[in-house]
Image (tube, helix red, strand yellow):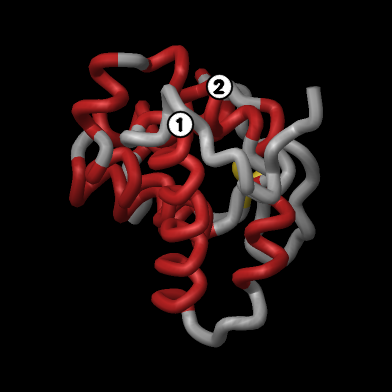
Amino acid sequence: MIDQRVYSICEEYGIEVIDGRAYPDIKQTRAVATMDRILRNRGEDHFRMVMSTLAETENNQGSLDEYLFWAVSDLVEACHGIIEAEPTKWLEVFDATPVGQLQYIARDLSGITHQRHALAGMLYERVVKAFGPSATQPDLFEERRRSA
């Protein structure tokens, strides 16, 4: 049985839970069992941060599947200190990340664990670039560097 908080928190963040046989649209998901496991295993505060990361950033709202929920959950756990110190910048990094494109790249890997971890790794690379040692002195040879 799914914890009713999953539905109420989804509603609070403007995410609609749809039938598992339907194809999700923007701000819709059918990954209710995944959200339930995250809520039960990691707690409501953690689950709310996952939902905030996904619902309050533009680039993530069209691809709310189980792999993305788990990957973001893993990152919220691993980057708790970063989120506490700079929550706005955390959301800005996710807003600037082409999440759908990264999901597309990871989809060729078989199995939930492989896709989840590949996606988490690709997302974490963006987090490290924004918050890590190179954040103040960007790599001039970075392929994603925008020309001035």
Instruction: Please give the residue where the numbered disc 2 appears in the rendered image.
Output: 92
SS at mark 1 in the image? helix
Q: What's the distance in space between the residues labelled 2 and 1, CA to CA?
A: 10 Å
Tag 2–tag 1 contact (CB < 8 Å): yes
Percent x, y of residue 64: 61, 48
Instruction: Please give the residue where the numbered disc 1 appears in the rendered image.
Output: 130
- Quadrant (top left, top right, bottom left, bottom right) of the N terminus: bottom left
Question: Of all residues shown, which one is farthest toward the front?
Answer: 140
SS at mark 2 in the image? helix
Q: Nearer the viewer, residue 122 or 134?
A: 134
Q: Residue at x 22, y 32 (%)?
A: 80
In which quarter of the view is residue 11 placed?
top right
Amino acid of disc 2: Glu
- Within 10 Å of the Cα at label 1, are there few (<14), some (14-19), or many (20+) other Cα atoms? some
Q: Nearer the viewer, residue 132 or 122?
A: 132
For marks 2 and 1, the one nearer the N-term is 2
- Labelled disc at residue 110: none
